[in-house]
Image (cartoon, rainbow, N blue to C red):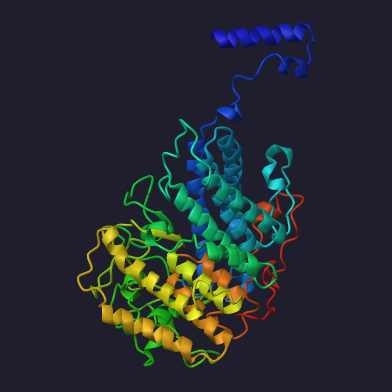
Amino acid sequence: MRLYKKLLTISLFATVLTVGCKKLDTIIENPNSVDPSLANVDLLLNGVQQNFVSVFNNLSDFGQEVTRQQAMTGGPLYNNAYTPPSFDGTWTTAYTGVIKNANAVIPLALQQKKYLQAGIAQVFKAYVLGSMVDFFGDVPDKDAALGQDNLNPKADAGAEVYKTVFTLLDSAIANFNKPTAPGVAGPPNDLFYQGSKAKWGTAAKTLKLKFLLQTRLIDNTVTAKAQSLITENDFIKADANDFQFKYGTTNISPDSRHPHYSNNYRPASVASANDFIGSYFMWAVGVEKSGSGAVTSLDPRRRYYFYRQRTNNADANSSTCPCVVQARPGHYTPEQPFCLVGAGYWGRDHGDNSGVPPDGTLRTTWGVYPAGGDYDASQGTSVNNTRGGRGAGINPIFMSAFTYFVEAEAALKLNITSAGTPKSLLEKGVRASIAKVLGFPATVNVVVATPPSAAAIETYVTTVLDRYDAATTDAARLDVIIKEYYIATWGNGIEPYNNYRRTGSPNNMQLTVTTANSGLFIRSFFYPTVYIERNINAPKQKNPGVMANKVFWDNNADNFIK
């Protein structure tokens, strides 16, 4: 009350003397405003981390849908599969939740000599900015940091934004290398690497290699830059260094479980799954390499990736699975899956927009990896919210297996072989992925009574390497590498979406089920409504009739992929 009376007296006195507002501002600071220099860096960083996870999940789902890992149920044409409002939440969270908060954290952390916190914020901002380019093309960068000084930021060219990405990652690496200042503590709630500067530095260098390789089609300086990084060899190549976010098992507000667990492992009173897994992806994992057209156990990860609520298709009929009474599309090649994969692997074809049948207790859902679901031991029982790892899954943002596949592409296409030959790096990637997946259940208290044998793992690895040896062109060899990368990314749709546009692999993707001509593949998504309609400097919306709209690093032909 005393403070209020004092302020009132000053205000009245100023009015009587006709003191200008600007002069008054030099006399007293507003007691209700927060001094930015006093903000808590660690609390701000918590917000950056949490919003980063949200952006990753949203972009990942979009990427998985167009690359057939999850089913794209819109369309069936690419230009009407999504609408601009679909991306509003992702855009808002990226710019206000990650980039804006990171912009606040970085200078404050540097001022307070909290170099680790500054570097972490720079990594998150770099990843999100780069991913926004990868999904939308030209996006705000420089003007986006001005806040109230510019409420209508213009879009910067994607290539220019990528320069910011590399600058941020280089600055982060430099900050991680700085000695800890006396009396300065690391972040108390580092949700990724528990305050390890070394692991954060390794992650930053790995992401730098990832973004470099994405530009290899249009930048002739990439080879030298990538060679330098690969020679240094400070990358994510061990399980302990995997760039991943771990979820919990709490199912009340706040729900700490993996979103694909909470969306599919619902209470016993509901006991049905929501997501549709792509038929093509289950076929690629469970059938393609068998050579017989039947589901086999060849890929050791199959029962870890997918949980079947039924182990056969006896319940498939015109009501629960309408496609079983429909003719196989004439535009499908003989090997491409249609409708049901078999043995209870119940998903949905690419672009099937026919509505939702009553199959929630029948469709295949996420397994123990990475969503913290259940291991498929042929139980054939419906899901509920007490099954498996109870949601204690992970977001596989960048894993050791991914690094080997990136290096394999660099070895094949850029002739950078200091880390190994393309074939040897392919093998390391496959083995790293299998080891990660098979070791995961123990980390979430799921018991696998009969895991795949060492002989089964060797059979799969040998099958992959034989396919590589049988390839007669670099394009075919790259397809083997990227196909294994594709399979290893389950839970991350960002990498397969980028890889598909850059390489055209996997080259036997399932076509949209309802039409042979679904239009040009989505090379970047619509700009969100919140950007186009609320920003006078926003570019024109992309033409829905010409959805190619390639990002700057994609110089492939418009009809390169389908």
**Which residue shows up at 60% across the image and 19% down it?**
31
Residue 187 falls in image quadrant: top left
Task: Report whether residue 209 is seen.
Answer: yes
**Which residue shows up at 61% across the image and 74% down it?**
502
**Is 161 or 293 nearer to us in this picture?**
161
* Relative horizontal placement of residue 147, taking residue 271 as reference (left or right): right
**Which residue shows up at 74% across the image and 54% down it?**
538
Task: Reply above or below: 58 against 181.
Answer: below
Task: Reply above or below: 489 against 2.
Answer: below
Residue 349 x/y as whole percent: 47, 79
**Which residue shows up at 39% across the image and 58% down it?**
394
Total marks shown come to: 0
Residue 118 x/y as whole percent: 55, 42
Residue 205 x/y as whole percent: 54, 58
Task: Report whether residue 288 is seen.
Answer: no
**Is 76 or 335 nearer to us in this picture?**
335
* Relative horizontal placement of residue 95, taking residue 477 as reference (left or right): right
Residue 5 falls in image quadrant: top right
Could you tell me which quadrant the C terminus lies in?
Answer: bottom right
